[in-house]
Image (spheres, rainbow, N blue to C red):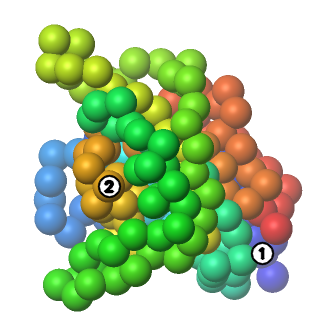
């Protein structure tokens, strides 16, 4: 029996978190970043406009375990405007967002203001300073609904401009270069 393999990737902006492109969009796929073994799957997803830590494996059981609510997922989010303490408190307590056309109350999590993180500039410019100020907030959740973090910041009046996942469980993005892949012994 073949031994399962585990990878940590710094997903670049504009890359689809898949190995096949059903919509035939002109975007990069994960397989264009690294020669992953057959059967490799992304554990969860980051949408095309999101960046950061993506875990991959050939082990379906490990994938299912990490996608469960047992593991925290931490995001650094650049938002439009100077986010207020009140908005940060709302994010901590959970907010109402729409999922598949229905109202959904997010679970309480952690949220706190952060200084501008030291990440490389994105391949596509976000916007000019003349469009107004921006600020950064960290959001830690255990769930992962479709575009949840983006919907959460919009719900408190501060739309997401840039979204970077920096942690899943104990795995950190750290200083892994954009587009780089690191093979690891285990993800659990």
In the current view of this chain or complex, which residue is farthest to the bottom?
Answer: 102
x 70%, y 69%: residue: 71
Image spot of residue 112 (x, y percent): 58, 44
* Along the viewing direction, whichever of 106 and 25 lies nearer the viewer: 106
Q: Residue at x 67, y 64 (%)?
A: 72
Residue in the picture at 67% in, 27% down: 175
Residue placed under numbered mark 2 in the picture:
156
51 to the left or right of 38: left
Residue 173, given in percent of the width and then of the height, sits at 65, 40
In terms of secondary structure, where does tag 1 sit? loop
Location of residue 98 by image quarter: bottom left
Q: Mark 1 points at which residue?
A: 2
Above or below, 23 against 30 in this view is below
- Residue 18 visible: no
In primary-sequence order, the first of circles 1 and 2 is 1
How far apart are the alpha carbons under marks 1 and 2?
48 Å
At which x and y percent is residue 23?
Answer: 15, 65
Quarter of the image for residue 17 reads bottom left
Label 2 Cα crowd, 10 Å radius (few <14 / some 14-19 / many 20+): some
Which mark lies nearer to you, 1 or 2? 2
Up/down of 139 relative to 147, above or below? above
Res. 181 image quadrant: top right
Q: Do the residues labelled 1 and 2 touch (CB within 8 Å)?
A: no
């Amino acid at each position: 029996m073949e031994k399962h393999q585990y990878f940590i990737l710094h997903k670049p902006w504009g890359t689809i978190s898949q190995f096949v492109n059903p919509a035939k969009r002109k975007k990069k796929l994960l397989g264009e970043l690294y020669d992953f073994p057959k059967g490799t799957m992304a554990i969860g997803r980051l949408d095309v406009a999101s960046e950061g830590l993506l875990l991959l494996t050939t082990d379906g059981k490990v994938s299912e375990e990490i996608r469960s609510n047992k593991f925290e997922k931490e995001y650094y989010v650049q938002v439009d405007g100077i986010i207020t303490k009140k908005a940060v408190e709302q994010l901590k307590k959970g907010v109402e967002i729409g999922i598949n056309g229905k109202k959904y109350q997010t679970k309480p999590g952690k949220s706190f203001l952060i200084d501008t993180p030291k990440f490389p500039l994105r391949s596509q410019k976000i916007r000019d300073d003349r469009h107004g100020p921006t600020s950064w907030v960290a959001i830690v959740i255990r769930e992962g609904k479709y575009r949840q973090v983006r919907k959460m910041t919009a719900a408190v009046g501060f739309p997401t401009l840039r979204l970077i996942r920096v942690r899943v469980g104990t795995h950190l993005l750290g200083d892994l270069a954009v587009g780089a892949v690191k093979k690891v012994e285990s993800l659990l």
